[in-house]
Amino acid sequence: MKYIPTIGIECHVQLATKTKLFSEVDNDARGKEPNSCVSPVDYALPGMLPRLNGEAIKFAVLAGRAMNCEINAYSRFDRKHYFYPDSPKGYQITQFYHPIIGEGYVELPSGTKIRIEHAHLEGDAGKLTHFDTYSLVDLNRVDTPLIEIVSMPDIHSAKDAHDYCKELWRLMTFAGVSYGDLYNGNMRFDVNVSLAPEGATELGTRAEVKNLNSFRSVERAVEYEIARQSKILDAGEKVVQETRGWNDNTGKTTGQRSKEEAKDYRYMPEPDLPPINLTAEFIETESAKLPLMPTDYRKKFGGVLKAEILEVLLDYAELMKKLAEIDEKYVVAIANLFTSVLLAEEKSAEYLNDLPATKQLNDLAEMNEKKELSSTATKEVFLRLFDPQMKGRDTKVIAKELGLIQENDLGALEAIVDTVLAKPETQKAQADFRAGEEKVIGFLVGQVMKESHGKANPSAVQEILRKKLA
């Protein structure tokens, strides 16, 4: 029997505020000692009251606008009760009844739109690390501000699940609301997968795969769940509604616990935080801060750059901002340098932290266009522009210091060609060319390049050689 998969995704996005959601503690604990970024509020010392971080509200508005969502003027916090070692309070402060972000949609590169049901603000839990006979808890992550983005069940393939998560990551990083560091858990995906027979009017029983932290893992987990649930249904059995974990090494999901419902968490209004009331002016002011999004860049460069090149570049927000500053006639040349040269480098991520000046890049493309630099020399100068010592320096000066400027003076080139043609070792090649052997022109060009120490313009050299040998 053929089954139609239906996939809904909940994405937890850590907001890049300086401090936590309810305390004045450092929010960026990457690389820091466990339990070093905590306060009495985080570990629930009796009597400690939460204080809402206003910056998180501004980031939530930006995140919502990046997803084409409505921003709710009224929202409030609730307590979600559960007992687990990574939650010292015994509850999580979240938004259940009145979230700050309403309905919207995310448009995939294919043009498919995935609807957003809502997104809400909440404080993160801590992190448990399990060993053979014991577990350790790190509370650095407690009350890191999160928005949890809940999609509608509009996804029906593993590829679209992958593309949705990646586009969501791009939106959050382009908007500047999250570092987007997947390795350190800045974004985590919970994927709900269900199968129903083709033509069915109701969705099947879903299984939720928790805490996926890469787009590839999302795709593989969905593929595995579709295969697993199909096998169960084909055998006439029922899929169990449960939470499952993903093992990247085995490529399999495993059952963890039965899926809780909202009633199991005993939600109640948070008594220590007042409701959030946003004015229309505040929402408008914060929304206006949204920079160009991936969709904007697709419209801007879609008719200029190849789709595959554009999609590679869209993984880098700062790079796209730089590309938007480049002279229109040089956009293709500079985009190709970034994709074929820089992103192929082992330390490309490091280089992208400090991009060359716009003028340096424009000048480089112009020099290449004027044949002042060969394609190889252009690549060499391009990489040198990322050297901190070259910051702000004139591109032409850098190329001269490296001895890479091509000789384009036709008089000077003709003199070099005459020198080469006078040499005994080139006589046979000249005779062969006159006899119709076109390929020997390459040998003669090479001899001229050698004589000029690599500075001659190969195209001009070939043109001079053909005229003289004719």
Image (cartoon, rainbow, N blue to C red):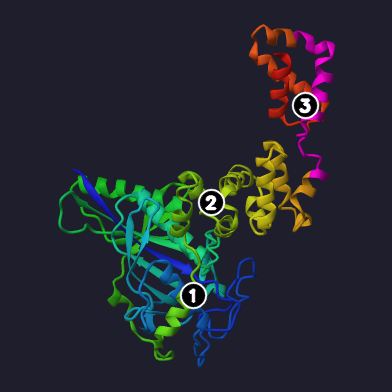
Q: Which residues are magenta?
A: 400-429
Q: Measuring 43% from the left and 84% from the top, which residue is drawn there?
A: 281
Q: Is residue 335 above or below residue 371?
A: below
Q: Measuring 55% from the left and 71% from the top, which residue is drawn there?
A: 16
Q: Measuring 75% from the left and 53% from the top, which residue is drawn there?
A: 387
Query: What residue is pinned by disc 1?
Result: 59
Specify few, some or many for label 3: CA neighbours under 10 Å numbering under 14, 14-19, or 20 or more. some
Query: Which of disc 2 and disc 3 is earlier in sequence?
Result: 2
Amino acid on which disc 2 is placed: Leu
Q: From the image, state whether disc 3 or disc 2 is nearer to you.
A: 3
Q: Position of residue 273 (x, y in %)?
A: 43, 89
Q: Please, what secondary structure does the residue beneath circle 3 have?
A: helix
Dots 3, 2 in contact, CB < 8 A? no
The quadrant of the image that shows the C terminus is top right
Q: Please, what secondary structure does the residue beneath circle 1 have?
A: helix
Q: Position of residue 282 (x, y in %)?
A: 45, 83
Relative placement, left or right, of 394 versus 312 is: right
Question: Residue 313: in sight, yes or no?
Answer: yes
Query: What residue is pinned by disc 2?
Result: 313
Q: Is residue 197 above or below residue 210?
A: above
**What type of secondary structure mainly makes up the magenta span?**
helix
Magenta residue check for 422: yes
Q: Position of residue 306 (x, y in %)?
A: 48, 44
Q: Position of residue 114 (x, y in %)?
A: 33, 60
Q: From the image, state whether disc 1 or disc 3 is nearer to you.
A: 3
Question: Residue 85: in sight, yes or no?
Answer: no
